[in-house]
Image: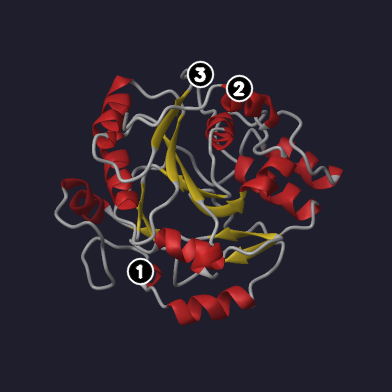
Amino acid sequence: MNTDTAPRASVVITTYNWPQALGVALAALARQRSLPFEVVVADDGSRDETRELIERCARDYPVPLRHSWQEDRGFRVALARNRAIAATGGDYVLLLDGDMVAHPMFVADHLRAAQRGSFVQGQRVLTDETGRDRLLSGETPQLGFFDRGLTRRRHTLRVPALAALGLRGSRGQSTAAIKTCNQGWWREDLVALNGFDERYEGWGREDKDLAVRAFHAGLQRRSLRFAGLATHLYHRERHDDGESPNDALLAEARSSGRVRAPLGLDRHLAEFAEHPLPDLRG
């Protein structure tokens, strides 16, 4: 995409009670070669340590840094993301998790991949305990192909030419490996879809639901490989990849042909239009 016409990228980064990881993730976004328009933290009810960490980061942050917090009433990441998306002012929304460390070209790669009529699905570089600890300690800001502590080494390779080739051939409507820890969406598409369905509470399936409704609306998925890299900080899974209490909701979304979330983003747009989240840089 021509940089003269590149959209303004708002990064929405989710978090819950892991301020050390969030600090590393925010630092990586501050080192982007192409800085985002803003960063909005979508906080699903963290304790004060997270707020204090964000406020410290904001003192010398290079772009507006905002904090959207909601009461801790269990896993409500759909609501947390919707509130943060409603607070964004950019044209393009990059969804990232607070345990993901973005490569310095993460934002630039996603903007290069952005195309009308589609969303972009990125991948994760996986670490083990060693890799996680090296990143959290500040020993290194990034892990490369030959570094210790990786479990999915091939995903560290950034090859823009291969990424461009892959994007050209990757349009489709598969929900395989849909993960909102590394995605790019036009904000107007998220508004048209009414964002995430907030009926999804507890772990799982709210990301696939969004993709299914996007496909119903005629949007295509573009898979970004060899670019848009982000490294996942290892932690024990808080769930398994088996059944979810939300499976019935997802099945209904698939069969209904529904495009808009019944309980979604439009609940928050007016609130943040009237009372924008402050830029914590002061």
Query: Within 10 Å of the Cα at label 3, are there few (<14), some (14-19), or many (20+) other Cα atoms?
Result: few
| Residue in the image at 27% along x and 45% along y | 24
Name the residue at the front extreme: 4
Earlier along the polypeptide chain: callout 3 or callout 1? Answer: 3
Residue 214 x %, y %: 73, 51
Marker disc for residue 271: 2
User: Along the line of sight, which residue is nearer the eye, 204 or 10?
Assistant: 10
How far across and down, in percent of the image, does residue 131 sit?
24, 56
* Alpha-carbon span between mark 3 and mark 2: 21 Å
- Residue type indicated by callout 3: Arg
Q: Quadrant of residue 173?
A: bottom right
Report helix, strand or loop for mark 1. Answer: helix
CA separation in Å, label 1 and label 2: 40 Å
Where's residue 177, x and y in %? 57, 58
Whether residue 56 is visible here, answered yes or no, is yes
Question: Quadrant location of residue 178?
Answer: bottom right
- Is 220 drawn above or below residue 26 in the view shown? below
Callouts 3 and 1 close, C-beta under 8 Å:
no
Element on which disc 2 rests: helix
Quadrant of image for the C terminus: top left
Q: Which residue is mark 1?
A: 156
* Residue at 55%, 56% in the rendered image: 7
**Residue 93 locus on image (x, y percent):** 55, 48
Quadrant placement of the N terminus: bottom right
